[in-house]
Amino acid sequence: MERKTGRIAVISDTHGLLRPEVAEILKTCDAVVHGGDINSPGILEEIRRINPSLYVVRGNNDKEWAEKLPKELSFSLFGKSFYMVHNKKHIPKDLEKKDFVIYGHSHKYEAYVQEGVQYLNPGSCGPRRFHQPVTMAVLIIEAESFHIEKMDILPRVEQEKVPELSQKDMEKLIKGILKELEKGTTVASMAKKFQVSKEFAEQVCRISVTHPGVTAHGIMDKMEVNKIVSKSGKNS
């Protein structure tokens, strides 16, 4: 007989980063659902080592390596029906009624009920995007009910007021971080080496991963670089 109770870790948009705080939460759950933008098969392997009961869909940044992953998925867990897709815009209008609809893509946590269906976007638990919080959710299924625990892995941060760097110096800084990324250097080590905030180093890495081939100048165009660089040597 299928269990009617359980804990489900709901994550999305890891973008090549499985934070240790997230991994610890996955260990406490009976299953994991991932809303896409994984960016690396290694992330799935790491999650499966922690929790082999994994349900996952392909995101827009999951390229050739993820061709065999479904773009949408329907499944049942603990007596409840689920539908999952990466982008909320791709939910079919004629979708058969489910108990839960899971999605990601926006990096923004969202949970609401519509026509008896619980919609849930756990936000992103990978690299921080600008000053947005880093979040996931734990869905707790009980015999006749459920509740959702929003997990704030990293809270929202205020923008740092720091001196602006020249375009030449900023481009040089980003190129240095990209070289360290190729070596497999950790974000914390990058931040320490270049005396920048961890958030800045994370953003450079994320954009590089999600936009293959992007130049340092292209990264500058995609992020609020001068607002999140710390020249004090104190990492956020």
Image: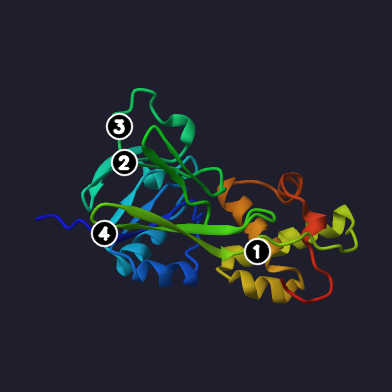
- In the image, which is nearer the foreground, mark 3 or mark 1? 3
Q: Seen in the image, is 29 located left or right of residue 173?
A: left
> Which residue is located at x 51 percent, y 54 percent?
15
Q: Which comes sooner in the sequence, label 2 or label 1? A: 2
- In the image, which is nearer the foreground, mark 1 or mark 4? 4
> Which residue is located at x 86 percent, y 62 percent?
161
Name the residue that disc number 1 marks: 179
Q: Name the element at disc 3.
A: loop
> Which residue is located at x 84 percent, y 74 percent?
232
Q: Amino acid at mark 3?
A: Lys
CA distance separating discs 3 and 2: 7 Å
Along the line of sight, the residue nearer the viewer: 39 or 28? 28
CA distance separating discs 4 and 3: 24 Å
Along the line of sight, the residue nearer the viewer: 102 or 164? 102
- In the image, which is nearer the foreground, mark 4 or mark 3? 3
215 over 22 or under it: above or below: above
Q: How many C-alpha atoms fall within 10 Å of the one at disc 3: few (<14), some, or many (≥20)?
A: few
CA distance separating discs 2 and 1: 46 Å
Name the residue that disc number 4 marks: 53
Q: Which comes sooner in the sequence, label 2 or label 4? A: 4
Q: Amino acid at mark 1?
A: Lys
Name the residue that disc number 3 marks: 97
Q: Quadrant of the C terminus?
A: bottom right
Q: Which comes sooner in the sequence, label 1 or label 4? A: 4
> Which residue is located at x 71 percent, y 45 percent?
222
Name the residue that disc number 2 marks: 99
CA distance separating discs 3 and 1: 48 Å
Q: Position of residue 141 (x, y in %)?
A: 30, 56
Q: How many marks?
A: 4
